[in-house]
Image (cartoon, rainbow, N blue to C red):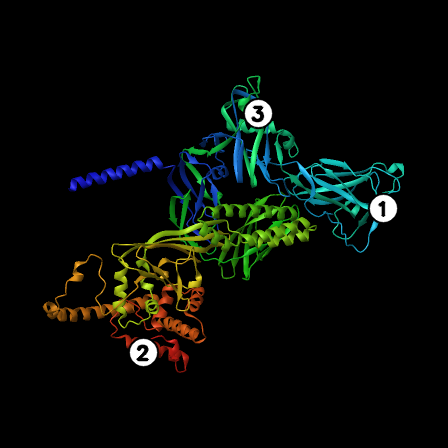
Amino acid sequence: MIKRGKIIAFLILLIALNLTVVNASFKYYDGVIENSYLGGEVIQGKINISFTNENAEFLFKSNFIGNITLLKLLELNDFSKEEDFKCSTLSCLPEYNTEENIVEIYLDKESVIGLKIEGNNIESISSIGFDIETNILESCSAPIIINLPGEEKRKLIASSYIDKSCTVKNYGCFDKDAASYSTVKIENVDICENIKLNPAPAYRIGARILNSTKKGSLKMTLYEDDGDSISCTLPQHSLAEEDLDCIIEKGFLEQENVTVCIKDTASSQGTNYKIRSEVKNPVCGTSERDFEIFATPLGYNTTKISFNTKLYEKSYSDSLEGYLYDYLSNNYEQAENGISCKPCIIPIHLSGLAQNLKFSNANLVFKDDGLTIDDSSYQNLYSLSIKPSTITSQPLLIDLEEANFLIPLTASDSKFKLFLNDNKIFEEDIIIKKSFDFSINPKFAFLGLETNFEVVTSYNISSAKWDFGDGVIQETKGKTIKHRYTEAKEYDLKVEIKRIDNTIAVKSFKIIAGNPKESANKLITDYKIRINDLTKEIKDFSPFAAEKIKSEINITSINNSLANLEKDFNSANTEEDYILIIDKLLDFNIPLDITIGKKGTLPIGIGFDNMDLSYVEEVLGKEFSDTEQLEGIIVTFNENYKTNIEFELFSAISYQGKEDLITKFKFSIEPRAGAEDAYLFINYPFDSIDFQNNYGQKKISEGSAVYIPISKEGKTLEFIIEDGIEVNELGSYLSPVIINLDEKIICLPGDEKCNIPFPWKKVIFWIFIDLGIILVIYLILQEWYKRYYEHYLFKNNYDLYNLINFIYNSRSTGLKDQEIRKKLKETSWSSERINYAFKKIDGKRTGMWEIPLFKVFENRRVKKELEKRQNNPLDTRFIKQPRF
């Protein structure tokens, strides 16, 4: 038997080793990690690791803040994808494969379609396109966004428009309510106003004209920042004063600052058109004036959209065919004079509103070996599957500083753990030294101008060290310093400050260098992306948990606030306006990630130490004098059921640290043979529990706990509690529906001894002898354990009686016990100490199943200590010991 067991064990080990080798996608060799940090610093160190067919988009993560894709981390470490690592695709971008020919799809947020091209030597794409029909007739928001492949992530929107204004007229800085105006003659020289335009397929631009007695020709022109322009001619006037406008068929994908101008090309012929102007600050027109010039975006006509080079050229200077050919060149093998396509796929990602899309007139013409291929087999669109690009490498020494794993100021974990796609690479002990929080102002910099940076903290600072992220490092004795950034980009500003008691704090800040307008626009864009990513991440959780998490984070409120700030941004005109918007944006606490910090499955018995049997008495309507026997019945009764508690703790990770959001519990109660009906008790406030369904749950003890009827068929139930809570803190247990202590203790089903009368007369002699010995031993153990457990919780018993005194005072002011527990938790008292204090003041057992031989002395001690602190006679209503 021993030899056979060894053989089986060896085979199991061999199989396990083989599975490990087959499934391994990376191999960690060794690493050197700095082991001493301050809260707010970034993990420093290097690891030696190799990869085999690892997904390029998999994330490196740690138990601290931040994550980064495998490909991005390798690129930031300056590794070459030709020399240091290999990708399964040429550009390390995903690989696409055709699935089925499509003519219609239902677009629900995102979808990917594509065209297929085959040839030995593809030299160029001559033409490409298709038409899209949608059941959305018109919209003021882009209903379909066409995302082109490639690293540049170019986008297209519908260019067809409807002559319907989507917003009120935007006059730029011109104040329509100004106290006074002057009139300016319109001549054959541009009079202009700077106006901010929202995305649209086309615009109406115009002005309020004081008309001439002679007909002329008024021309409107829209200039972009890069100098491109488009013009239209205003219609002839019919009134002495009226708004005249014309349409420019020019669309923008993003919000744009443009200059809208007017001039009279016939002014030399004696026309006399005029326009109102004012000089009230702010001014954003020509000649230090603002003019009554306006623009308004038009709606999208989305019945039919043609994806072709004409649509592309309205947004980009090069050709659609050339851009897509470059994409193929970067992702497929090169031939002698072109690309080898066997086949090649051109993916098109579609996103937008929920809608039905129909495709037609697909067209792909290309040159292969000098021949123009124009064949019906290339006039099909396909749904695509996506295969991620994988990375294989020899051992690489990777600098983890580039991953920017940030240690929160509140970090309590004494280990650094590194993961790749949730697979642990390694963990190592580190030391996180005492630190403190601070901030800096501002968090953006004026490009080319000195910005005055200041440490924001209530502490007295003896020195500060500033690493501006552009190669400049300076030290100061105080809290302020001036610095000038000369390049518009995002910097990592690292600040190390020292308090007068020599305590050091280190934090890094993202500094957007540029003008305030650009900074505000980037923050809004980044927040939109972060909210969108969070929404997608939350959607992957169960619907029950997802709704509660969204409520906790308050995504709807954040979105509304962001939308309001975006409106403020669109109407802002001065640097002060943009600075105010940035300050408000920086106050947002949008999580970087939502994680499941803890999860597992535990038996119901884990919470027996915190169960409160008074709830059984309340529900059954009777009191039990022998609580020890009652507890024995409860514990034995729970063995009639197989009960598991699954739990998941969801936490939000932000720059401020980790915050526990909710804990989700799932109780699976499965009866064994012969089980009876039961009650499930949960020792947690009723109003603090959010049940997924109605399980018949009812409140007891004025809502301080919950009980749920459980039939002998069993039950599965789920609920959520805000914040982080351990399973044992629920104090849950099952109880019989009927309990009679005059009868025998309930036996397990099938136990034949229950039907045999116990032979009392035969063993009564030995019972008395054994009982005396056991009683003495048990009393010694009982008293030793009580004192040991009390000393373990309260090193100084003054802390215990001060806590009991707090409970007494709180009860006397009318607070419920659950409210008292909540207040104590908020002041960092642990649940275990709180439960002990409540049991002590209520005269309940605090240790093992207890023979209450010395209980009266303990209760007297509690009363004596309370009287000492109260200096008044005690009100026994607030001490729930039976003798009071």
Identify the mark nearer the N-term, 1 or 3. Answer: 1
Residue, far top: 370
Identify the mark nearer the N-term, 1 or 2. Answer: 1
Q: In the rendering, at what x and y percent does residue 443 appear?
A: 59, 51
Mark 2 lies on a secondary structure that is loop
Asked if the residue under mark 2 is in contact with the one under mark 3, i.e. CB atoms within 8 Å, the reply is no
Which of the 4 quarters of the picture holds residue 355?
top right
- Single out the mark in the foreground, 1 or 3: 1
Closer-to-camera residue (657/238): 238
Mark 2 burial class by Cα count in 10 Å: few <14, some 14-19, many 20+: few
Quadrant showing the C terminus: bottom left
**Residue located beneath label 1 in the image:** 240
* Residue type, label 1: Ala
Q: Is residue 20 left or right of residue 506?
A: left
Q: In the rendering, at what x and y percent does residue 148 appear?
A: 57, 34
Residue at 75%, 36% in the rendered image: 231
* Residue type, label 3: Leu
Q: In the rendering, at what x and y percent does residue 744 appear?
A: 21, 66
